[in-house]
Amino acid sequence: MATTTKAAAPAKKSGFLGVKEAWIILAICCVAGYSVWYFVMGNPDNFIGGDRSGHPANLLGTVYKGGFVVGLILTLLFTVICLGIERFFAIKTASGKMNLSKFTA
């Protein structure tokens, strides 16, 4: 009498796996940051007479006058927000079912 055994199926990964290539997020945030700087803050409605080289009419126009560094700052801000949300989901998924005080003891 021959018995056959089946190989165990590989364990399925479940839940949020995290971001494997963060440079993609950085590139998207860079495009978003410079787009907000140029198209939203640099909108001609934010300047007196509709000329970007003129005097700003409101706060968005004033921030636009800060130069291309503003786009870089927005890129960093968007990156921190995106990766913070990603880390929240990754840590929430990785949390165990054991009591934390038992685990640390």
Image (tube, helix red, strand yellow):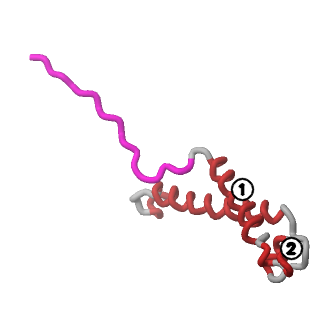
Q: CA distance from mark 2 to mark 1?
A: 25 Å
- Is residue 72 part of the magenta span, yes or no? no
Is disc 1 placed on a helix, strand or loop?
helix
Q: Nearer the viewer, residue 80 or 29?
A: 29
What's the amino acid at mark 1? Answer: Cys
* Residue 30 horizontal/vertical position (percent): 71, 56
Question: Is residue 76 visible to us here?
Answer: no
Is disc 2 placed on a helix, strand or loop?
loop
Span highlighted in magenta in the image: 1-19
Can you say whether 22 is above or below 70 in the image?
A: above
Can you say whether 22 is above or below 71 in the image?
A: above
On screen, residue 12 versus residue 44, left or right, reads left
For label 1, the residue is 30
Question: Is residue 11 visible to us here?
Answer: yes
* Residue 13 horizontal/vertical position (percent): 40, 45
**What residue is at 61 percent from the left and 45 percent from the top?**
21
**What residue is at 68 percent from the left and 52 percent from the top?**
26
For label 2, the residue is 51
Pointer 2 local density, CA inside 10 Å: few below 14, some 14–19, many at least 20: some
What's the amino acid at mark 2? Answer: Asp
On screen, residue 84 versus residue 50, left or right, reads left
* Residue 96 horizontal/vertical position (percent): 43, 57
Q: Quadrant of residue 51?
A: bottom right
On screen, residue 58 versus residue 87, left or right, reads right
